[in-house]
Amino acid sequence: MAQSTMPCDGTRPAGAGGTGKAVGAGGWISAWLTGAVALVAEGTLALIVFGIVALQGEDAYFAGAGASLGWILGAVLGVVAAALAGLTGSAAVVLPVLRLSRRSARRAGRADTALRCLAVCAVLAVVTGAVAGAVGAVRGDDAARLLLVAPVVFLVLSPAVLCARAATVVRGPGARVAVPAVVGAAGGALSAVALAAGVVAYATGTLELYEPPRLTEEQLVGTWTDDRGGTLTLRADGTAVADDLGAEDRCSGSGTWERTERGSEPELLLLGDGCPEESYAFSGTAEHPSLYHLFGDVEAPGRYVLRRD
């Protein structure tokens, strides 16, 4: 009876649909870079979509006078973080998935196809989702969000794995250099299309930029409460009373308040004894307004919010 043998160098029988050649160091390096480029392209596209959506929200980084600085800083940090994450993620996840797919195909005596790569990605996504679900159940996390872990992992991982697999299939130094270049160009084109679509959507009014409410002095009068029960009472005569107020150091006291303008943005300036001088910007909507100021780390500040009692 005729028998076929399976080489141990990562090759596949030609009859099983394989090339019959090992990937080699050059192929794996190209696959690593291709996977990294694909992950960076996915991250860039996700960041653009997030930014387009966030411009409709009341986040301090995307509305008001600090928007331009926030976008520039976010873009620079995003590019650096995406590059590092792409290189690390490709080495830690994408390449192991490719190797696992090739090994399972070799043991089964079948071709290492794109479908097999997708199956390995699906298994990894399910395992990740199960682990996240178990940990989340212990911590009491939102079950609905935990159900999204597996599909999100699959949607993020599978394009990068398929792109990296292409680099292991092609032959020749030129082709292996071309694969990450083509993936990067395609990713850049998709990001450009998404950015252009966002610009058109806002320019035509299909989407609307968030504008904070321009509260009048009459609208500011009343009691404002934070999420820990602290209150700030603003009276019509310009006096103010704070009770257990503050993001970090809680304080109580009395003083005065006034509505001022900082550039083109209105704000509340609070002066008094017992609490430090503080300015609050406006957010929320005219029907459900809120006051806030940023605190802590300049690069990643917290947001202290007061809402109408």
Image (spheres, rainbow, N blue to C red):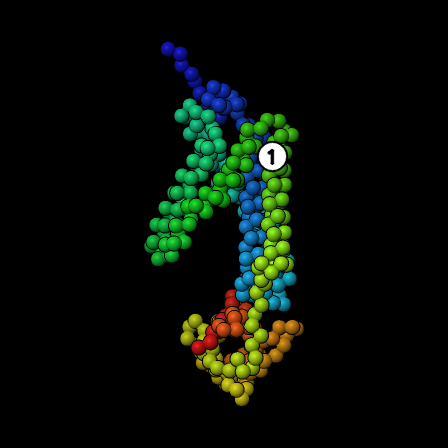
Q: Quadrant of residue 38?
A: top right
Q: Amino acid at mark 1?
A: Val
Position of residue 72 in the picture relative to residue 287 (left or right): right
Residue beneath label 1, please? 179
Which residue does the image show at 56% across and 70% down from the upper left?
212
**Element at label 1:** helix
Q: Quadrant of residue 31?
A: top right
Which residue does the image show at 60% across and 67% down from the upper left?
64
Q: Sort mark 1 into few (<14), some (14-19) or many (20+) by Cα contacts within 10 Å.
A: many
When the figure is inspected, residue 217 is found, relative to residue 51, above or below; the finding is below
Where's residue 157, x and y in %?
A: 49, 42
Q: Nearer the viewer, residue 42 or 95?
A: 42
When the figure is inspected, residue 278 is found, relative to residue 112, above or below; the finding is below
When the figure is inspected, residue 107 is found, relative to residue 122, above or below; the finding is above
Where's residue 108, x and y in %?
A: 40, 25
Report the number of numbered marks.
1
Position of residue 208 in the picture relative to residue 110 (left or right): right
Q: Is residue 75 visible?
A: no
Where's residue 129, x and y in %?
A: 39, 46
Where's residue 14, x and y in %?
A: 49, 20
Q: Quadrant of the N terminus?
A: top left
When the figure is inspected, residue 192 is found, relative to residue 244, above or below; the finding is above
Residue at the farthest bottom position: 237
Q: Is residue 119 visible?
A: yes
Which residue does the image show at 63% across and 77% down from the upper left?
261
Q: Quadrant of the C terminus?
A: bottom left
Which residue does the image show at 43% across and 18% down from the upper left?
5
